[in-house]
Amino acid sequence: MYKVLKPFNAGGIQFMREQYVDDAVVDHWANKRLFINKKFIVSEGDQHCYIVKKAFFGDGENRTAGDFIDLRWRHWRNERALLKAGNLRHATAEEVQEFSPPRNSDLPAQPGLDNRAYLAKRYVADEYSGPKIAKEIGCPVAKVYRALHKFSIPMRGPADYVNNKL
């Protein structure tokens, strides 16, 4: 996992500060070394995977001791405060591997708006709604619909909602 320190464009995609990029994506860049050396990105490893130590309410859910929280694809602004207060602890590599989906999963490795396979699987095959995908990725709903349009993924209309196809 890499964290973006300075905004830049790569492969036709704009990467913004504080965004996270999967290792598999970065490994395909011909100028990967340049981005690292010039401090555009920095390797984060699995630093944003946590185990709940003390129960708390966060992200619309009750979190209980022992829960695994993966914040590699999104960000909580109170992440540091929860660590400092002792509500969270960093997950070990074994815990990350245990809780992470298997590599041969039918879902692509990186959920995101730039991943057509992920969006098609979630929206068409799994029949997720735009707001549900937006919550999973951690972005505004409008961006999900723009990405669906960009990849020409057929969107459901009002009739689908009326006929209980969702």
Image: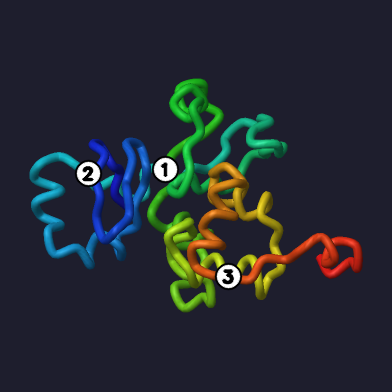
> Which callout, 2 or 1, points at the residue further toward the start of the chain?
2
> Which residue appears at 47% of the width and 37% of the height?
75
Element under label 3? loop
Give the left or right position of residue 76, taking residue 18 as reference: right
* Label 3 sits on residue: 153
Q: Nearer the viewer, mark 1 or mark 3?
A: 3
Give the left or right position of residue 98, taking residue 55 as reference: left
> Which callout, 3 or 2, points at the residue further toward the start of the chain?
2
Name the amino acid type tagged 2: Val
Asked whether the beta carbons under mark 2 and mark 1 sit within 8 Å of each other, the answer is no
* Label 1 sits on residue: 48
> Which residue appears at 36% of the width and 47% of the height?
20
Name the amino acid type tagged 1: His
Image disc number at residue 42? 2
Element under label 2? strand
> Which residue appears at 52% of the width and 26% of the height?
82
| Image: 17 above or below 21 | above
- Estimate the x, y position of residue 41 in percent, counting from the top left: 22, 44
Element under label 1? loop
Quadrant (top left, top right, bottom left, bottom right) of the C terminus = bottom right
Image disc number at residue 8? none
